[in-house]
Amino acid sequence: MGRVIASEFVTLDGVMEAPGHDQHRDGKNAWALQHATEDQQRFKVEELFEAGALLLGRLTYQIFAAFWPTAPKDEGFADRMNSIPKYVVSRSLKEATWNNTTIIDTPPAEAIAKLKRDASGDIMLYGSADLLNALTRTDIIDEYRIMVFPVLLGSGKRLFKDASDTTHLGLVDTRTFESGVTMLTYRPADPAPSSRYVETFAWTGEHMRSWQAAQDAERVLATILFTDIVRSTERAAAIGDQRWRRLLDQHDEVVRTEVERFRGRLVKSTGDGILATFDAPTRALRCAFALIDALGDIGLGIRSAIHTGEIEIRDDDVGGIGVHIAARALAQSADREVVVTRTVRELATGTDLAFGSLGSVSLRGVPGEWELFTVSVG
């Protein structure tokens, strides 16, 4: 039986995107190559030759497949990359042209568990952050080798998503290379660790009241709008990375225009969508409808969710349970659909607004049942 080992490059601020010459939205690529040293390269060569197969997500596969077939023949690394069995997890990839590649288009956890049972060597997972995050929620990954590079990139895709569940790991090895790159090797920890300091430094009721008093000064009532591009992965695969990035730039311009038009505040991009706040739920609703129409004109479908509640002002960001509720409600929305909580339903005005009940649902991480509605314009 083989092991699945996630071997990853990451910056000090958690970015894994474009460690080589592949594209970065802000042009901040090749940060890992800039710190590469001979001892680090020897380790990667040994790691690859000891592996029995590679496991990749679609995007990492396409980056590798574009480079390695014609890459420089250095220490046999390229030859090994081209000859080793490769498994790419993708429902949108129709054909794998890179030598010795098999497409996994079924639920990955089950397929990869079977690969582990049948494997005679370790299966290395390189890059592929989305696949890594999906597998971290299962018992599939046996070891994490995280090479931390001494650079703060400031932007780019993070290795682990903000919404990841808590996963406890145990440190089993460390190694520092000549460049200052440090490799941290972890394995899943079971059970979760415990310490007497959890109780020693537990907050009392007085601590909580003091903290809440300080936080209350930064709390405001606001309406939160989340959007998300529907089927973004499939669309990106269909049109290619360059066209997709140009389409995302158009998306961002449309979003800025419409949020400003309805007097909202664009807080941040969430990857394939946005988080914005408004001083009234009706403005948020009108903005959501405008975004659906305007983005539809450029070929993008979105889903939206809106909640009105208290939020915490955090410099240029916002947080708190109100934001969390809106984010979870987004999962209940579909293409060209706006989903809102009962609070929005009761506060929104407009005779042309029609609300349809979705019933009461549980929102992950939010206590109680929440009544949700779809909204349309009559």
Image (cartoon, rainbow, N blue to C red):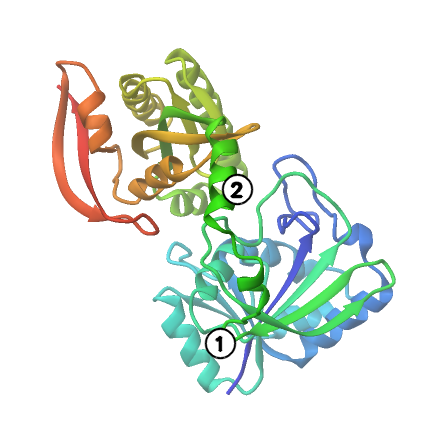
Residue 288 location (% of width, % of height): 31, 24
Residue 52 location (% of width, % of height): 59, 80
Can you see residue 275?
Answer: yes
Q: Is residue 357 above or below residue 118?
A: above
Which of marks 2 and 1 precedes in the sequence? Answer: 1
Residue 130 location (% of width, % of height): 48, 55
Picture residue at 73% right of the left edge, 69% below the top? 44
Q: Is residue 311 above or below residue 1?
A: above
Residue type of the residue flagged with mark 1: Pro
Identify the secondary structure beneath mark 2: helix
Q: Nearer the viewer, residue 118 or 212?
A: 212
Mark 1 and mark 2: Cα distance apart in space: 41 Å
Picture residue at 56% right of the left edge, 56% below the top? 60
Picture residue at 39% right of the left edge, 36% below the top? 323
Q: Is residue 79 left or right of residue 333?
A: right
Q: List the single residue furthest toward the front.
A: 206
Picture residue at 69% right of the left edge, 78% below the top? 49
Q: Is residue 45 left or right of residue 189?
A: right
Q: Is residue 17 left or right of residue 21?
A: left
Which residue, given by chain and number where applicable, does mark 2 sit on?
241
Which residue, given by chain and number where applicable, does mark 1 sit on?
191
Residue type of the residue flagged with mark 2: Asp
Residue 352 location (% of width, % of height): 14, 15
> Badge 1: how crowded within 10 Å, few (<14), some, or many (20+)?
few
Q: Nearer the viewer, mark 1 or mark 2?
A: 1
